[in-house]
Image (tube, helix red, strand yellow):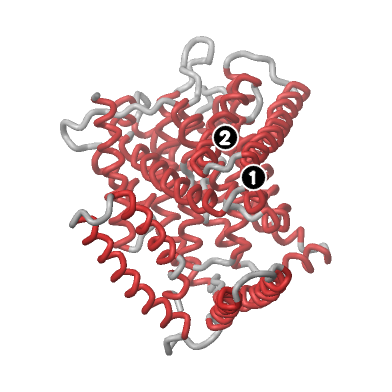
Amino acid sequence: MEGIVDTVVMIVIAVVGAALARRLGFVAPLVLLVGGLALSFVPGLPEIHIEPELVLVGILPPLLYVAALQTSVPAFRRALRPIMLLAIGLVVFTAVLVGVGLHLLLPEVPLSACIALGAVVAPPDAVSATAIARRIGLPRRIVTILEGESLLNDATALVLLRVSAGALTGLAVGFWEIAGDVVVTAGGGLLLGVAAAVAAAWLHKKIEDPLLDDAVSLLTPFVVVIVAEKLETSGIVAVVVAGLYLGHRIPYLLSPTSRLQMEAVWRLITFLLEGVVFLLVGLQLRELVSDLETGIGTTIQATALVFGLIVVLRFVWMYPAYYLARLSPRVRDREGPTSATGPTVLGWAGMRGVVTLAAVLSLPESNAVTSNYPRDLFVFVAFAIIVLTLLLQGTTLPLLARRLGVHEDTTVADALAEASVQNQASRAALKALEDNVDGAPDSVVERLRGIAENRNNGAWERLGSQEQETPSAAYGRLRREMIMAERHVFKIARNEGRIPEEVLTRAQRDLDLEESQLSRSDEQ
């Protein structure tokens, strides 16, 4: 019962923190992190210990899965070169050099242990970065690169962590052992992800009940990661591959009701998981400080060194990767003109989060077998890196983007593209109407023609001036008032006993669905 109460309290705090963040104009991870830091020192508050399995199996897979579902595969494919350079090249580069630098500072600590910490802090987390990027209107290509990097860098970091942790525990590690581990882990994860995606797609296609569709979608990342653990392959790679495949195929696999319902369910789950995980990071501070056995001077030096290295190394990697690639005319033609502002913003968007949390908690305990490395120091440094990057980089990224003028307003372009495609879609709809009109009343046919024409006109209206109310906006405003009046009559009838609750529920559902469709009209 106590565990249930603690969970409910954390969810309540996460919800309140997210609401406060929206009111203050900050992204929720920053507010929840600060809130957790403050609450960790409240007298009488019980210490909360995070199990690594909770993060690796219970939190990280669904977050990565839903991020992959929402990723545009065509955009991901177009940005594959910079994504792979960051997700693989930069992670290895950072992990090795952070490990070497930390080993020079602490020569008594094995190099393998230092590289393990480097692998822990190497992968950025895109939750806060993409939230900020979308809010301030960064170019879509930058957002796609950040999202793609976060989807793939986790697997790179965790493979590196496995290799370095294996060396730390005395396992022989050579080139062929590492290569074999990478092939088995990443390759096996890729095959498992494809197999899981095909199986889930088959189930989605056969299922007609939206509730069962939701259940399959919710279970997919957990089943995939559990099977991956049994097969000793990368659950992260498998979950991401399955999410990318299914996200691209969802328009063909699910009914409209299932898609709407599933989107709402995943939005709620993501909202709660992200809120709780950043709150938990902040709440760990008191326990970390009390468990720290390393001297304060060494702790500060190690934290400052690791933080400085991950910030500097990201820029050191970013600029050559950006400019050297553009020596190729094909890359210049495909990726646009050269500008230093894009890689600068990408370089500063290196906030750490869930992956670093999961990785550091999985570090082996310090004992005679693991060369007695300072695990308490490593855990503290990793948590400090999460806090410092979120607070320093997360709060200043919008300012940097504004100062550099890195902004992309796609409102008009999106509206024009939508109107053009909607025009084609309306013509296709009218043709389908004409092909199937036999026997239908003229009034029904005219009504359907009007719906197609109104939808087409509404798309073009979004290109016009927003100062004057458009016909679609007026329709939405007036129809909403009519729906409110209808809903009120049904409620009174239920209260007076003239209709049962089931009739009210059906009528209200129909009215709710129609009202939800008016939101586009309200945006005019």
**On the picture, is 144 further left or further right than 1?**
right
Q: Is residue 327 above or below residue 232?
A: below
Could you tell me how many numbered marks the image carries? 2
Residue type at the position of mark 1? Leu
Say which quarter of the image contains residue 518. Answer: bottom left
Residue appearing at x 37%, y 26% in the figure: 294
* Furthest residue in direction left, as rendered: 43
* Furthest residue in direction right, as rendered: 329
Q: Secondary structure at mark 1?
A: helix
* Furthest residue in direction top, as rendered: 368
Residue appearing at x 41%, y 76% in the figure: 476
- Camera sees residue 344: yes
Q: Please state which of residues 29 and 503 is positioned toward the viewer in this rendering.
A: 503
- Answer few, some or many: residues within 10 Å of disc 2's Cα (few below 14, many 20 plus, some between 14 and 19): many
Q: Please state which of residues 40 and 254 is positioned toward the viewer in this rendering.
A: 254
| Residue 237 percent coordinates (x, y) | 64, 36
Residue type at the position of mark 2? Thr
Ranked by sequence position, the earlier of labels 2 and 1 is 2
| Residue 301 percent coordinates (x, y) | 43, 38
Which mark, residue 220?
2
Residue appearing at x 40%, y 33% in the figure: 380
The residue under label 1 is 246
| Residue 15 percent coordinates (x, y) | 30, 48
Residue appearing at x 64%, y 47% in the figure: 253
